[in-house]
Amino acid sequence: MTRELLLAAFIMGVGLSIAAAGTHLYQGVARQQAMLRLDGRSLWGAVGHLAMSIVCGPYIMLHMGWQHEDDSTLSMTSALIGALVAFTWAFVTGLFFMSFYVAFFR
């Protein structure tokens, strides 16, 4: 059982690492903040934002969970829900990229 738990943690780590790297790469190249969105000036712009939201979503959700309230306090509920969604999403993202790696590069 420990082996399966460590494998799941490794997959989440891969997903979160890819999401963080993709977020910082997007912000550096596009010169705008990465956020979950579907808008775009054209169809290809909207598809690009959708792809960025899917890949970079876990990292963005972690940051959204740690936002401060109006009185400069941190909402524990917001942080826990953000972390739950982010790590679940990171597992799916990591599973996708690791499956892609195993299918094409091994």
Image: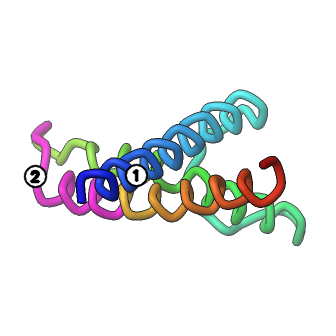
State whether residue 41 is above or below residue 73.
below
Numbered badge on residue 76? 2
Horizontal side of 32 relative to 2 (left or right) equals: right
* Magenta stretch secondary structure, dominant: helix
Numbered badge on residue 15? none
State whether residue 73 is above or below residue 42.
above
First of labels 1, 2 by sequence position: 1
Mark 1 highlights which residue?
7
State whether residue 75 is above or below residue 49.
above
Point out residue 12 in the picture as x, y percentages from the top left corner: 43, 50
Horizontal side of 45 relative to 100 (left or right) equals: right
- Circle 2 crowding by C-alpha within 10 Å: few under 14, some 14–19, many from 20: few
Q: Nearer the viewer, mark 1 or mark 2?
A: 1
Q: Secondary structure at mark 2?
A: helix
Q: Quadrant of residue 83?
A: bottom left
The residue shown at (23%, 62%) is 81
**Looking at the image, which is closer to me, 80 or 5?**
5
Give the position of the N terminus as an image quadrant.
bottom left
The amino acid at mark 2 is Met
Q: Quadrant of residue 48?
A: bottom right
Horizontal side of 82 relative to 63 (left or right) equals: left
Q: Which residues are magenta?
A: 72-85
The residue shown at (81%, 48%) is 105
Point out residue 18 in the picture as x, y percentages from the top left corner: 59, 42
- Give the total number of marks visible in the rendering: 2
**Looking at the image, which is closer to me, 103 or 70?**
103
The amino acid at mark 1 is Leu
* 75 within the magenta span: yes
Point out residue 96 in the picture as x, y percentages from the top left corner: 63, 62
Tell me, yes or no, whether the two marked residues, 1 and 2, touch with CB atoms within 8 Å: no
The residue shown at (88%, 71%) is 43
